[in-house]
Amino acid sequence: MIALYVLPLLLQYLFQKYVEKNNIYILAIESSCDDTSAAVLHNTKMLSNVVATQKIHEEYGGVVPELASRAHQQNIVPVVHQALAKANINKKDLSAIAFTRGPGLMGSLLVGTSFAKSLALGLNIPLIEVNHMQAHILAHFIDNESGKKPTFPFIGMTISGGHTQIVLVKSYFDMEILGQTLDDAVGEAFDKSAKILGLPYPGGPLIDKYAQLGNPKAFPFPKSKVGELNFSFSGFKTSVLYFIQRETQKNPNFITENLNDICASIQYTIIRVLLDKLKKAVAQTGVNQIAIGGGVSANSGIRKVLQEAEQKHGWKTFIPPFEFCTDNAAMIGIVGYLKYKEELFATQEITAKARYVINE
């Protein structure tokens, strides 16, 4: 008789636990640089992804850390509110709070970290810390219209304003950095080259725009020669600077008359560097699945070359939707979901980390 009474209760308990584990709502917060973002994910499906972009940095030609952290303080509450409203859920429905712990600007990270810790404590739900670089790679596992997701192992290439890395991704939480920039990141190479040309910040998208109208082989620029799979773009920026100085001395209107060709040549050289390193990574690892991430992965030239690589080199390439390229909270949310499944929670003692290496 006791068994007849206990068995239904046990089954009900097990079913409730199954539902809880497979019905996960993650609120994610991203504040690593100059974009304040909040997103809500239901398992691997994105319900909302709100981003507040800080325009003030355009006046200074680059991100000013102090101004960025102040803007995060102003934006974070309304952004989180909008994310919950768009997802049409109440904060009491949340399973956990995920946030960017690092890497990034310390002041900006502190705003997101403090807010996430406070909200998780107030709601009495788990807190999940996320490595920003890991999130760029795992953004490919957010549900999307194509339904395409890489399988393990694959090579992840993260290209952004602050980072350039080639990573061997063995599983969700087992990643090995094969190569990275020794100085400047690829996004900085684009933006600084644009600044030399007199283009407003951020200049990378403008170089991409003008490059589509120019001859990519009009002006040859040197490619840095650093060991194996590492990158270096400081010398490239210097070569662009000296080239422009030399040519404008001869012809003050050189930039205006040749802008499309200059941009096309700059973009072509940078893309060749990235592609050459990817070829080496594939040759060394035997892995031919390539997944890119980071703000520069929105570049049309890079996306086109990678799509062509599927035919030329037999690669299987994965290119994220535009909304997951730049810094956004949805990519933080997918890592939060994957960590929640493994019960990889953080404590209230967790602190922001400006330098935060993958798998550290």
Image (spheres, rainbow, N blue to C red):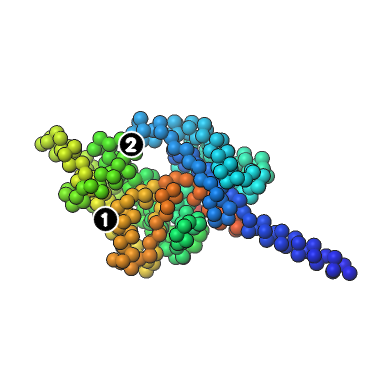
Classify mark 2: residues with Cα within 10 Å, few (<14), some (14-19) or many (20+).
Answer: many
State the residue at coordinates (50%, 42%).
Answer: 50
State the residue at coordinates (19%, 46%).
Answer: 261
Residue designated by label 2 = 201
Q: Position of residue 296 (x, y in %)?
A: 36, 48
Q: Amino acid at mark 1?
A: Arg
Mark 1, secondary structure of its residue:
helix
| Residues marked 2 and 1 touching at CB (< 8 Å) | no
Judging depth in this view, the residue of 254 and 279 nearest the camera is 254
The label nearer to you, 2 versus 1, is 2
Q: Position of residue 328 (x, y in %)?
A: 47, 45
Q: CA distance from mark 2 to mark 1?
A: 24 Å
Taking 11 as reference, is 133 above or below it?
above
Quick check: 226 left or right of 261? right
State the residue at coordinates (65%, 47%).
Answer: 93
Quick check: 195 left or right of 138? left
Residue 272 bears which disc, if any? 1
Question: Most extreme residue toward the right, as rendered?
Answer: 1
Count numbered badges in the picture.
2
Q: Amino acid at mark 2?
A: Tyr
Residue 314 sits in quarter: bottom left
Q: Work out whether mark 2 precedes mark 1 in sequence or the reverse, and give the earlier one.
A: 2
Quick check: 275 left or right of 33? left
Q: Position of residue 143 (x, y in %)?
A: 50, 57
Q: Position of residue 173 (x, y in %)?
A: 51, 58
Residue 83 bears which disc, if any? none
